[in-house]
């Protein structure tokens, strides 16, 4: 019922196959939505479907577990290069040459690309504060912002550390999450302050980790190209540095390309941790095989994201799912869950489950071009054989 007591209108969506969850796929069904939530999924006679409905699949919309929308204006401008640290330097230089309006247009374009390909929610890391002001209110509701914090690991707190802490307090005050950039770029004093403050420690948190050999070298040995850019090395691993300050449990770790043996032991004991893999970004940089089996062995879920338009050839979660199947050997169900049910846990919006189960937020996407039944829908979708998803407007039908 609405606040006035009037019955809320129901929106109904039909398809030849409906993916409620990866282990519950139904044929010729109707999804009923009331008040922005899934009310029911019910069978309908196949002959009542239109040709368009019969040849489409309804599924939970994708959830992108990691993006940098603010870098949208840099699409295609910075090639990967030989060393990751050089790419980062070139990227920051190119970004610094852009005006605020260009950055905002790029952020809008990145968000539009994701939503137009069937993504309902995006976990976004923003270092400049340009994303939220750039987006329309309905899009802002689907982009869950994390403010990036870094101070380049100084030997002792300096103005950069204080600025990062001030940004953290402001972010939490406005309901945003925190993203200490990485255990190499956020120093011990900054991490200690985040861990010691109960409000900051409990905020949603995502951290880049073990992305490059340069990062691992500097953290462990103080060597490599980061030596001249950062302060003294902690002579430890990235996860040991986070754990020392109480910042490992509950953290969404991004990339994780090069986990060390002692870090895997920490992950096995950690609570509420997941790793985000971005297959398109991985391919962009020509990186070696992603260690998915190591994470399986210690019980850590692997989720999927896109990273940015500057480090990926397309912002399309369906493509990430297909690449995950091709490069990681994931089953259709595993790849699908890594972009729906898995990351839903990290979305701070009521009812977001990454499923079409009754009571869930009505985040539906329609994928056209299916010529089979329910038994082949998940395979066709995750293999990239269907059209890119289109978000359904839950208020558009009655």
Image (tube, rainbow, N blue to C red):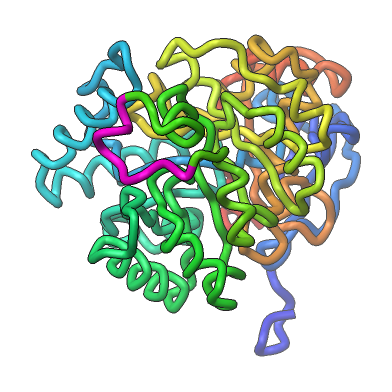
Residue 227 drawn in magenta = yes
Q: Which of the two residues, 18 or 266, is positioned nearer the viewer here?
A: 266
Q: Which of the two residues, 43 or 386, is positioned nearer the viewer here?
A: 386
Query: Residue at 82% of width from left, 16% of height from top?
Result: 376
Prevalent SS, magenta region: loop
Can I make out residue 182 in this image?
A: yes
Query: Residue at 64% of width from left, 38% of height from top?
Result: 275
Query: Residue at 61% of width from left, 56% of height from top?
Result: 244
Query: Residue at 51% of width from left, 41% of height from top?
Result: 66
In the rendered view of the protein, which quadrant contains the N terminus?
A: bottom right
Q: Where is residue 42 in the image (x, y as percent from the top left)?
A: 89, 46
Q: Answer with left or right where residue 119 lies relative to residue 165.
A: right
Q: Which of the two residues, 5 or 307, is positioned nearer the viewer here?
A: 307
- Is residue 69 shown above or below 221? below
Q: Where is residue 185 in the image (x, y as percent from the top left)?
A: 38, 46
Question: Among all residues in the image, which is located at the extreme bottom?
Answer: 4
Q: Position of residue 372 (x, y in %)?
A: 80, 14
- Is residue 206 shown above or below 37? above
Q: Answer with left or right where residue 309 lies relative to residue 53.
A: left
Q: Answer with left or right where residue 282 lies relative to residue 34.
A: left
Q: In which quarter of the image is residue 261?
A: top right
In the rendered view of the protein, which quadrant contains the C terminus?
A: bottom right
Can I make out residue 111 in this image?
A: no
- Is residue 265 shown above or below 156? above
Q: Where is residue 377 in the image (x, y as percent from the top left)?
A: 78, 21
Q: Which of the two residues, 5 or 192, is positioned nearer the viewer here?
A: 192
Residue 382 drawn in magenta = no
Q: In which quarter of the image is residue 15?
A: top right
- Span shown in magenta: 225-234
């Amino acid at each position: 019922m609405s606040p006035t007591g009037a019955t809320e209108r129901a929106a109904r969506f039909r398809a030849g196959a409906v993916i409620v969850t990866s282990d519950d796929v139904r044929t010729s069904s109707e999804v009923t939505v009331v008040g922005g939530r899934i009310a029911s999924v019910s069978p309908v006679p196949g002959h009542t479907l239109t040709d368009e409905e019969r040849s489409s699949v309804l599924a939970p919309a994708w959830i992108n577990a990691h993006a940098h929308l603010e870098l949208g204006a840099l699409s295609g401008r910075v090639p990967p290069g030989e060393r990751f640290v050089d790419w980062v330097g070139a990227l920051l230089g190119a970004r610094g040459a852009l005006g605020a309006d260009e950055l905002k247009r790029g952020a809008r374009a990145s968000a539009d690309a994701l939503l137009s390909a069937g993504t309902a929610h995006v976990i976004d890391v923003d270092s400049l504060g340009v994303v939220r002001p750039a987006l329309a209110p309905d899009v802002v509701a689907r982009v869950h912002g994390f403010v990036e914090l870094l101070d380049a690991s100084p030997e002792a707190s300096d103005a950069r550390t204080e600025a990062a802490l001030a940004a953290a307090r402001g972010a939490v005050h406005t309901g945003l999450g925190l993203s200490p950039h990485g255990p190499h770029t956020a120093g011990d004093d900054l991490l200690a302050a985040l861990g010691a403050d109960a409000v900051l420690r409990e905020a949603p948190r995502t951290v880049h980790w073990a992305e490059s050999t340069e990062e691992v070298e500097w953290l462990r040995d103080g060597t490599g190209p980061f030596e001249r850019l950062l302060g003294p090395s902690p002579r430890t691993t990235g996860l040991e540095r986070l754990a020392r300050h109480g910042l490992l449990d509950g953290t969404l770790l991004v990339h994780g390309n090069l986990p060390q043996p002692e870090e895997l032991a920490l992950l096995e004991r950690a609570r509420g941790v997941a790793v985000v893999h971005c297959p398109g970004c991985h391919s962009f940089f020509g990186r070696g095989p992603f260690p998915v089996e190591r994470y399986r062995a210690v019980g850590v879920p692997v989720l999927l994201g896109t990273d940015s338009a500057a480090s990926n050839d397309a912002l399309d979660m369906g493509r990430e799912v297909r690449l995950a199947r091709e490069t990681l050997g994931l089953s259709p169900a595993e790849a699908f869950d890594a972009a729906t049910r898995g990351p839903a846990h990290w979305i701070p919006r009521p009812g977001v489950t990454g499923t079409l189960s009754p009571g869930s937020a009505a985040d539906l996407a329609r994928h056209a071009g299916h010529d089979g039944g329910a038994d082949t829908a998940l395979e066709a979708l995750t293999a990239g054989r269907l059209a890119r998803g289109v978000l359904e407007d839950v208020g558009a039908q009655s």
